[in-house]
Amino acid sequence: MTSENQSAQVQQARDLGAEERKAAGELELGAAAIPMMVAAIGLVVSFFLPHSGVVLGFDVLLDTEVARKYFTTTPERIYSVLVVLGVLLTVATLITRTTAVAFVTWALSCVQAVYSVFSGWMRQSRPQELAGEGIAWGLAVSIVCSFLLAITMSVIAFRRTRRQHEIASERRAHADSDPVLRAQQAYLRSGMTPHTTTDVDVVDDRRQRAKQRHRQG
């Protein structure tokens, strides 16, 4: 192989690496954008729906007098804040379409989904002597949308785009055209065989040398 061919293959490998890094930083939402928008809209609407009895979602978020009167718990307030952050990050993911934002949204949506169950459990397990009611349908909608968002972001964040699959195919084709890479792949596929033999004959003469020292002594 000439030096020009080697340089061309090295440059091609560098170009593929740069394209792969660029493709890894971009999202391909496709049809997944629809459940994302549905979840975000549902979470926003839940703030205007009954959270529990006469307590609305924004009462919990703003910690109004109505929320305090009916003994809204701290996990419920934390969950309402997470919902706001989740909606904002979902919108940012839809606008930027970057992997970094998507992973942040995925992590927050998973925490939000867990807190949605915790919030509903706290509302249902309240002592009977406290004023207020159980889960209203606004909180139920919010819980369903939180799980929908978490599942959708899990698919989006860990799914490889079409361009990434194309680059992987190009890498395999490039590896097949390079004899050095072919040899490396063949070695890795065959596994590492430990070198247990030696071409040098080693004789253990320690006892004989010890006897000679003993006679001399």
Image (cartoon, rainbow, N blue to C red):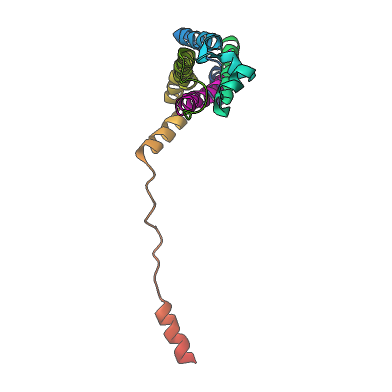
From the top left corner, tell me how far across and down residue 174 is, in percent: 46, 22
From the top left corner, tell me how far across and down residue 64 is, in percent: 64, 18
Q: Is residue 152 left or right of residue 85?
A: left
Whether the magenta-drawn stretch holds residue 119 is answered as: yes
Whether the magenta-drawn stretch holds residue 3 is answered as: no
Residue shown at 50%/10% (left/top)?
Answer: 42
From the top left corner, tell me how far across and down residue 200 is, in percent: 41, 61
Q: Residue furthest left?
A: 190
Quarter holding residue 190? top left
Residue shown at 39%/44% (left/top)?
Answer: 192
Residue shown at 39%/52% (left/top)?
Answer: 195
Q: Nearer the viewer, residue 201 or 55?
A: 55
Residue shown at 37%/41% (left/top)?
Answer: 191
Q: Main secondary structure of the magenta part?
A: helix
Magenta highlight range: 97-125
Residue 177 sits above or below residue 49 on the image? below
Tell me, yes or no, if residue 198 can be seen here.
yes
Q: Nearer the viewer, residue 78 or 40?
A: 78
